[in-house]
């Protein structure tokens, strides 16, 4: 992957965003193909792959990436520049987090025992909401937040932050 940012921690967040966007694009294609009618068969190979990848990405994105941004990056940005943008991004996390969590639960359940028609309907509806909100959130962070972080974070802190993030993801 081409390096877009000079700080390792910022580049890592950028790569998380790109991986999430790729998953959301695949999810959108799958939801569109299968439609919102009765639940599809879970032996659909494309669907089962997307469900597996969705669980991984949703849990990484909500569990670790959001937490790291909130604990380590929003406070630095607020102190150095302004609290408005981090507060807005944090509100978006709060709106997306329960949707992502519910989708991960539904996907995990479906991998074990398939979707009921009601669960599939909910999954399609939440999927549309998640895609819309998360794509918009990532676009905002990519355009304004990450470039500004390159100015805010002391390059001497980059190694420690990168290590803290790797530990959070691994633990
Ligand atoms: Fe975020
Ligand atoms: Fe992010």
Image (cartoon, grey):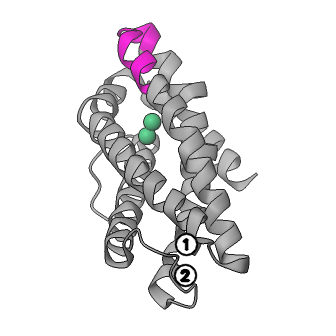
Vertical placement of residue 158 versus 105, above or below: above
Q: Which mark is residue 51?
A: 1
> Residue 8 occupies which quadrant of the picture?
top left
Q: Secondary structure at mark 1?
A: helix
* Residue 167 shows up from this direction: yes
79 in the magenta segment: yes
Vertical placement of residue 54 versus 90, above or below: below
Residue visible at 47% across and 42% down in the picture? 9
* Whole-number angstrom distance, CA of label 1 to CA of label 2: 5 Å
Could you classify mark 1 by the number of other residues whose Cα lies within 10 Å: few (under 14), some (14-19), or many (20 or more)?
A: many
Stretch of the chain drawn in magenta = 78-89
Instruction: Specify whether 142 is left or right of 156.
Output: left
**Which residue occupies the foreground of this view, 130 or 89?**
130
Q: Secondary structure at mark 2?
A: helix
Q: Main secondary structure of the magenta part?
A: helix
**Which residue occupies the foreground of this view, 109 or 69?**
109
Farthest residue to the right: give it. 171
Q: Are marks 1 and 2 in contact (CB under 8 Å)?
A: yes
The residue carrying mark 2 is 48
Could you classify mark 2 by the number of other residues whose Cα lies within 10 Å: few (under 14), some (14-19), or many (20 or more)?
A: some
């Amino acid at each position: 992957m081409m390096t877009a940012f000079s700080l390792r921690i910022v580049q890592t967040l950028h790569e998380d965003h790109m991986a999430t966007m790729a998953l959301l694009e695949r999810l959108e294609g799958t939801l569109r193909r299968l439609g919102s009618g009765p639940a599809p068969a879970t032996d659909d190979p494309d669907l089962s792959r997307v469900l597996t990848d969705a669980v991984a990405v949703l849990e990484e994105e909500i569990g670790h990436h959001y937490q790291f941004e909130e604990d380590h990056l929003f406070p630095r940005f607020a102190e150095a520049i302004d609290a408005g943008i981090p507060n807005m991004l944090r509100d978006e996390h709060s709106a997306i987090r329960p949707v992502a969590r519910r989708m991960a639960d539904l996907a995990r359940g479906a991998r074990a025992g398939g979707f009921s028609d009601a669960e599939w309907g909910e999954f399609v509806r939440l999927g549309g909401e998640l895609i819309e909100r998360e794509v918009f959130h990532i676009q905002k962070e990519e355009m304004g937040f990450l470039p500004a972080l390159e100015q805010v974070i002391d390059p001497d802190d980059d190694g420690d932050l990168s290590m803290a993030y790797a530990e959070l993801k691994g633990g």
